Image: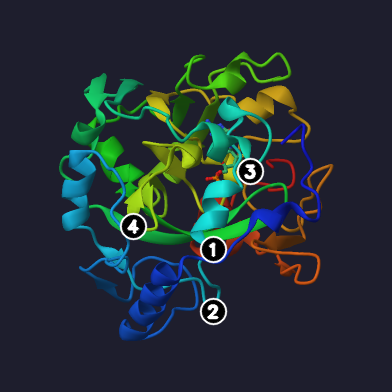
Amino acid sequence: MLIKIPPASASRESDVTPESIYLSRRSFFAAAGGVAAALALPRVSSADVSPYADVEPAQAPAWFADKLKSARWQAVTAGNESITPYKDATHYNNFYEFGPDKGDPARLAGSFKAEPWTVMVDGEVGKPGRYAIEDLFKEQQLEERIYRLRCVEAWSMVIPWLGFSLGDVLKRFEPTANARYVRFETLVDHEQMKGQSSSFSLIDWPYIEGLRMDEAMHPLTILAVGMYGRVLPGQNGAPLRLVVPWKYGFKSIKSIVRITLTAEQPKNTWQELAPDEYGFYANVNPAVDHPRWTQAHERRLPSSLFSPNVMPTRLFNGYDEVATLYSDLDLRTNY
Ligand code: MTE
């Protein structure tokens, strides 16, 4: 984000969704009684059959395939906003561990080995330990959540994630009374993630992110393990990433290997690199500009010169229900 400003033509890689996915989504929405005005919880309707039934199953670990059988699918999307084509969501990525260009992750993360995978849970918890990914979610049902994803670079997408409530995961580890923040850490693997060895990279690895405890416990916050009815591809943060839909995309840390509950506010990677540009909160806010990108509007992908698809940005990315978390906070100074 520090290094690259996307050119106006940046969505030229965009393509249409494979027709099978597009059609199944359309008929699914129609069958489910149309769309809702916002992506608020609780859901008005859900279903127990995958809307992606006619999609070739991708190679997925056994635990994921198992969870998929009993997944709860979301029947609503963001008003009349349509889901971003799979091709764009998986070929226009920010994942600096694989390089700074939007196409690097798709090109280089294809063979990323995300199995087996363990996550260290430590800090202010009653049950610290290293857990296999399947054990983290043992008692939870896989859920689809269709969320807007808004990057601070002023592009946006609408993604159907598959994941689990982060709050429910955290409760299992028994947070202590001192737990006020959650710190997340991405894998460091110089062999697989060549961007981590690049002398051009300014990032001090591992990539770090953090949330306040109430943000982490909010029902909108999820740990995603899949998207578009499939297991998460390497370029989107396999096997496990954070999704916080009312915050800029850089908060959605990928390929998580450690979750630490802390008393102190953690410093995130971008804040560490450029504190005047990136803060801890990173709530989507059209009234607070980034020094290099106005935040008043966003370009919904796919977009092109002839069809730029620019729309006004909404405070908290349209997720008004989180406003109460910040009633005592000056959002201009706490950017
Ligand atoms: N997580 C890690 N570990 N490394 C990264 O470079 N980039 C962030 C975030 N998570 C990033 C990361 C940024 S800047 C954005 S906008 C989103 O991932 C992009 O997610 P996507 O590629 O799935 O669209």
Mark 4 or 1 closer to N-term? 1
Q: Is residue 35 above or below residue 308?
A: below
Amino acid type at mark 4: Gly
Mark 3 or 1 closer to N-term? 1
Q: CA distance from mark 3 to mark 1?
A: 23 Å
Q: CA distance from mark 3 to mark 4?
A: 28 Å
Amino acid type at mark 2: Asn
Q: Is mark 2 within 8 Å of ligand 1?
A: no
Amino acid type at mark 1: Thr
Question: Any mark on residue 196, and which?
Answer: none
Q: Nearer the viewer, mark 3 or mark 1?
A: 1
| The quadrant where residue 220 appears | bottom left
Label 4 crowd (10 A; few <14 / some 14-19 / many >=20): many
Q: Which residue is mark 3?
A: 282
Q: Is mark 4 within 8 Å of ligand 1?
A: no
Tell me residue 226's x, y (percent).
36, 48
Label 2 crowd (10 A; few <14 / some 14-19 / many >=20): few
Tell me residue 121's x, y (percent).
31, 23
Tell me residue 262's x, y (percent).
43, 23
Tell me residue 39's x, y (percent).
46, 67
Do residues under tags 2 and 3 come within 8 Å of each other at their CB atoms?
Answer: no
Q: CA distance from mark 4 to mark 1?
A: 14 Å
Q: Nearer the viewer, mark 2 or mark 1?
A: 1
Q: Which residue is mark 1?
A: 84
Q: Which residue is mark 4?
A: 229
Question: Any mark on residue 80, and which?
Answer: 2
Mark 4 or 2 closer to N-term? 2
